[in-house]
Amino acid sequence: MTRRYTPKVVTANRLLAGDAVWLTEDDTWSTDMAEAELIEDEAHAQMRLLHAQSRPHEVVGAYLTDAAPGHDGPRPVHFREEFRTRGPSNRFHGKQAEG
């Protein structure tokens, strides 16, 4: 029996600022996970990951993570990714101060 594929998004950290970012369909990096490309095909996900990893001048630590479709775009499935959507936790600034 084959396992059903769980949708994914490509995420990384911006090289200079360190922000968590997600790869969009138009090959830009967004700090908003809801703008990420939700990938529902395993082969396509691997290709997008390789593409992200080939951009070391922009991001570091690119990887695939599970995501679920939401009414505003992809949303995190795991606590770690939920935590990363809120920005740095060492000081009250950035995304934390905005929302």
Image (cartoon, grey):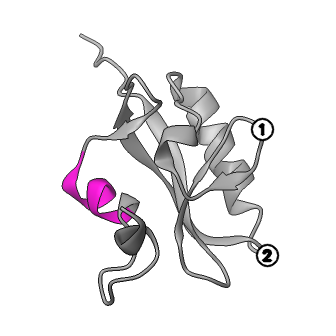
Identify the residue position indicated by label 2 in the image.
57
Indicate the secondary structure of the residue bearing disc 1. loop
Q: Amino acid at mark 1?
A: Asp
Q: CA distance from mark 1 to mark 2?
A: 18 Å
Residues at circles 1 and 2 in contact by the CB criterion of under 8 Å:
no
Q: Determine whether, in the image, residue 3 is placed left or right of residue 9.
A: left
In the rendered image, the residue lying farthest to the top is 1
Q: Determine whether, in the image, residue 6 is placed left or right of residue 63.
A: left
Indicate the secondary structure of the residue bearing disc 2. loop
| Position of residue 72 measured from the top left corner of the image (x, y, whole percent) | 45, 29
Q: Determine whether, in the image, residue 89 is placed left or right of residue 23.
A: left
Identify the residue position indicated by label 1 in the image.
26
Q: Which image quarter holds the N terminus? A: top left
Is 76 a magenta residue?
no
Is 79 a magenta residue?
yes
Q: Residues within 10 Å of mark 1 (few under 14, many from 20)?
A: few
| Position of residue 84 measured from the top left corner of the image (x, y, whole percent) | 36, 64
Q: Which image quarter holds the C terminus? A: bottom left
Q: Amino acid at mark 2?
A: His
* Residue at image coords 36%, 38%: 75
Mark number displayed over residue 41: none
| Position of residue 45 measured from the top left corner of the image (x, y, whole percent) | 57, 35
